[in-house]
Image (tube, helix red, strand yellow):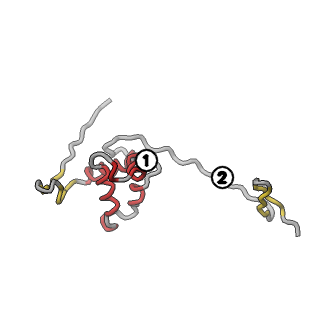
Amino acid sequence: ATTTTTALSMKLLVDTQARRVLFAEASKDVVDFLFSLLALPVGTAVKLLGKESMVGCVGSLYGSVEKLDGTYVQPGAAKDALLHPSVLSPAVSSKSSLLGLPAPPSPQAKTFYRCSKQCLPDLHDGELRYLLSVM
């Protein structure tokens, strides 16, 4: 098995007095990596526990994505998918992903059935039944 390493770099302008980052310049790989962290169940944990209760910078990252203006999001990309992840996004598991996670399973196709004639729903003793309407 061949292991490849990728170096990530970014430029930061830091206010040392206030102990905060004023400006950051990073490559697409760095931004993709940071966003991929939110696509993990960590994003859900931040949402459930609250940004303030998170250790480290994950809560700050989540808050920054919440405030991110739509003009900075790629067309067709949903910021909501990062803030409310349900499964790993394909971007996180793609071959170019820095995390190298496997692709999420494809969802199973749903099958729907309907009455061949006009049917009416009927709730009887807490059980839903369908009655054939006779006219």
Name the residue type under label 1: Leu
Residue 7: which quarter of the image? top left
Tell me the residue that label 2 is attached to: 111
Viewer-closest of 116 and 81: 81
Q: Is residue 132 left or right of residue 88?
A: right
Q: Gap in Å between the C-alphas at discs 2 and 1?
A: 24 Å
Viewer-closest of 98 and 85: 85
Tell me the residue that label 1 is attached to: 88
Q: Is residue 23 above or below residue 45?
A: below
Comparing marks 2 and 1, which lies closer to the viewer? 1
Residue at left offset 24%, top offset 38%: 5
Q: Is residue 5 left or right of residue 87?
A: left
Name the residue type under label 2: Thr
Residue at left offset 18%, top offset 51%: 10
Q: Residue furthest bottom?
A: 135
Viewer-closest of 130 and 32: 130
Residue 12, horizontal then vertical, whole percent: 15, 54
